[in-house]
Image (tube, rainbow, N blue to C red):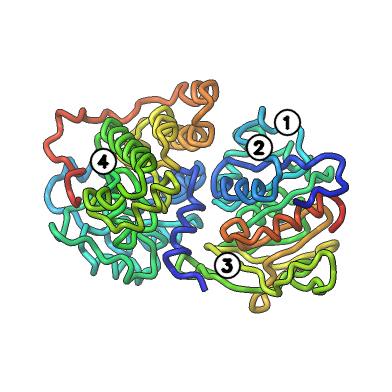
């Protein structure tokens, strides 16, 4: 009998090669689905607005999430605060397809993440390096994404996190078997996870890019760097022509290795989200929850 | 492995627009079969003996197929006899509300959301019921079946043979050169369903 962990990792496998879009209303969810999103993230405010509004940011109103569940047939994800296992229980109670234990919201616990193995619904977590990714997997995350820097429209942090993870994975694969114990100690993760990465050259779960993706080229960049799919948050509904941009990003992820197609997709997309450069931001969400 | 008596080893195209296409390629590679990915119209024109439509989201695949001019050529090739194997979303893509090449209607998300996803050991006609003394026997009366936000076949018409049912719901079927499963054979180590499809291509199943 397969366990929930396996079934939950399997759902992430079905999302690969796809784009998961942040939506705040049933109308936006329908637009995202029609544009080809493989899932939507239901939240009250997209990261750019969370950033602008300031204050404590929490799980969205379950009624709002249910409205989005009713509007679309693709999987619906929602965010809870890091360590806030009751918000996670609520999301499980409304049968969400994936919970994002997310640094985009204000953390509820500065020491402990949620014990995700206690839940039947799957969790995706952010990571900026291999150690964070494997610690989240050890806690029961069945999908990983880069943290990036949400709500900025600046892809630099997602690139940094994906490059870091990939280079650490490559380093692990090159180690001798007897060096893996020390690597496990340094990464602060169990030996069997380190051994899996050493043997397979990849994480044991699907790994997406997230944070700051705003254009088809950004999405293709993340795919070429090794992402298996892309989350787009503020980049779509903060742009001039969300429908066209959403469709273009979906196709750019499929044909991420084909510059000619990406060139065509990049034409006439209208205004991209304005964005904030990394050195202009005051709050680094990626530093939450290590 | 099972290419005995064949003129050439089949080449299988895997629709790689979105979803678990890599898992299918790995299964076919285990069986020693050459594969290539279809991501756009140019890829489609390469010669192939069969097509796999993987699991993923049928709305995503539908959108991309229309936008990248793949819908008509794929539909026409299947109607023209190109052997095809669809899993989960791939089953939905072949039903009467999508490509319409198979005489079936799929019920999407038939088991509900992710909490309804499940694993089942079940029987599959032509695979688990082959007598043990037969050359084709696989010696195992159960097939692993992983259902992820799966559909089932709500109704079927002429020419459709049901190959597997779980709790009274039809979850695998064949119509001529077309094979569909609501579950994901590519997620388990058992290669028998893929081998069955290769048998269809070679005309021995």
Q: Cβ–Cβ below 8 Å for labels 1 and 2? A: yes
Q: Secondary structure at mark 3?
A: loop
Tags 4 and 1 on a common chain: no
Q: Secondary structure at mark 4?
A: loop
The residue lying at 74 percent from left, 49 percent from top is B84
Q: CA distance from mark 1 to mark 3?
A: 35 Å
**Residue holding disc 4:** A150
Percent from the top left, x then y, of residue A227? 41, 39
Label 1 sits on a secondary structure element that is loop
Q: Are marks 1 and 2 on the same chain?
A: yes
Asked if residue A200 lies left or right of residue B176, the reply is left
To which residue does mark 3 refer? B110
Work out whether mark 1 precedes mark 3 in sequence or the reverse, and give the earlier one. Answer: 1
Between the C-alphas of marks 3 and 2, the distance is 31 Å
| Residue B68 sits above or below residue A287 on the image | above
Between marks 3 and 2 in the image, the one whose residue lies nearer the viewer: 2
Same subunit, labels 4 and 3: the answer reads: no
Between A58 and A159, the residue placed more toward the observer is A159
Q: Chain of mark 4?
A: A
Write the residue at 52% across / 70% down: B118
For mark 3, name the chain. Answer: B
Q: Which mark is residue B46?
A: 1
The residue to which callout 2 is attached is B36
Given residues A105 and A202, the one toward you in this image is A202
Tell me how far mark 2 sits from mark 4, CA to CA: 36 Å
Q: Nearer the viewer, mark 4 or mark 1?
A: 1
């Amino acid at each position: 009998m397969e366990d929930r962990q396996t079934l939950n990792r399997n759902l992430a496998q079905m999302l690969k090669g796809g784009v998961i879009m942040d939506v705040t209303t049933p109308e936006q969810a329908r637009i995202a689905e029609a544009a080809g999103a493989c899932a939507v993230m239901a939240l009250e405010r997209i990261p750019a607005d969370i950033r602008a509004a300031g204050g404590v940011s929490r799980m969205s109103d379950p009624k709002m999430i249910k409205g989005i569940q009713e509007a679309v047939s693709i999987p619906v994800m929602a965010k809870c605060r890091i360590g806030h296992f009751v918000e996670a229980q609520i999301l499980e109670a409304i049968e969400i397809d994936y919970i994002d234990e997310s640094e985009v919201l204000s953390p509820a616990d500065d020491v402990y993440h949620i014990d995700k193995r206690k839940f039947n619904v799957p969790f995706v977590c952010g990571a900026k390096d291999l150690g964070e990714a494997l610690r989240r997997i050890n806690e029961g995350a069945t999908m990983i994404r880069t943290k990036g820097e949400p709500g900025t429209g600046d892809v630099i942090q997602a690139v940094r996190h994906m490059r870091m993870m990939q280079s650490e994975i490559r380093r692990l694969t090159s180690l001798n078997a007897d060096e893996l114990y020390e690597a496990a100690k340094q990464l602060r993760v169990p030996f069997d996870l380190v051994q899996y990465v050493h043997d397979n050259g990849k994480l044991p779960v699907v790994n997406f890019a997230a944070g700051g993706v705003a254009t088809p080229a950004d999405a293709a960049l993340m795919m070429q760097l090794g992402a298996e799919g892309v989350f787009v948050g503020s980049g779509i509904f903060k742009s001039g022509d969300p429908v066209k941009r959403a469709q273009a990003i979906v196709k750019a992820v499929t044909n991420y290795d084909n510059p000619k197609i990406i060139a065509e997709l990049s034409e006439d997309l209208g205004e991209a989200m304005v964005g904030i450069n990394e050195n202009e931001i005051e709050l680094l969400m990626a530093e939450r929850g290590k | 492995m099972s290419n005995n008596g064949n003129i050439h080893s089949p080449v299988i195209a895997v629709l790689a627009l979105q979803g678990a296409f890599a898992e299918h390629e790995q299964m076919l590679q285990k069986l020693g079969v050459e594969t290539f990915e279809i991501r756009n119209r140019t890829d489609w024109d390469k010669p192939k003996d069969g097509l796999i439509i993987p699991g993923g989201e049928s709305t995503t695949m539908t959108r991309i197929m229309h936008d990248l001019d793949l819908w008509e050529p794929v539909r026409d090739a299947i109607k023209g006899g190109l052997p095809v194997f669809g899993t989960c979303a791939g089953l939905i893509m072949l039903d009467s509300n999508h490509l319409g090449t198979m005489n079936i209607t799929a019920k999407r998300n038939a088991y509900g959301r992710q909490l309804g996803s499940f694993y089942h050991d079940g029987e599959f006609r032509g695979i688990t019921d082959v007598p043990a003394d037969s050359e084709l026997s696989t010696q195992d009366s159960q097939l692993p079946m992983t259902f992820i936000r799966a559909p089932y076949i709500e109704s079927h018409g002429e020419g459709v043979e049901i190959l597997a049912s779980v709790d009274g719901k039809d979850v695998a079927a064949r119509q001529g050169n077309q094979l569909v499963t609501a579950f994901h054979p590519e997620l388990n180590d058992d290669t028998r369903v893929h081998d069955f499809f290769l048998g269809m291509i070679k005309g021995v199943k």
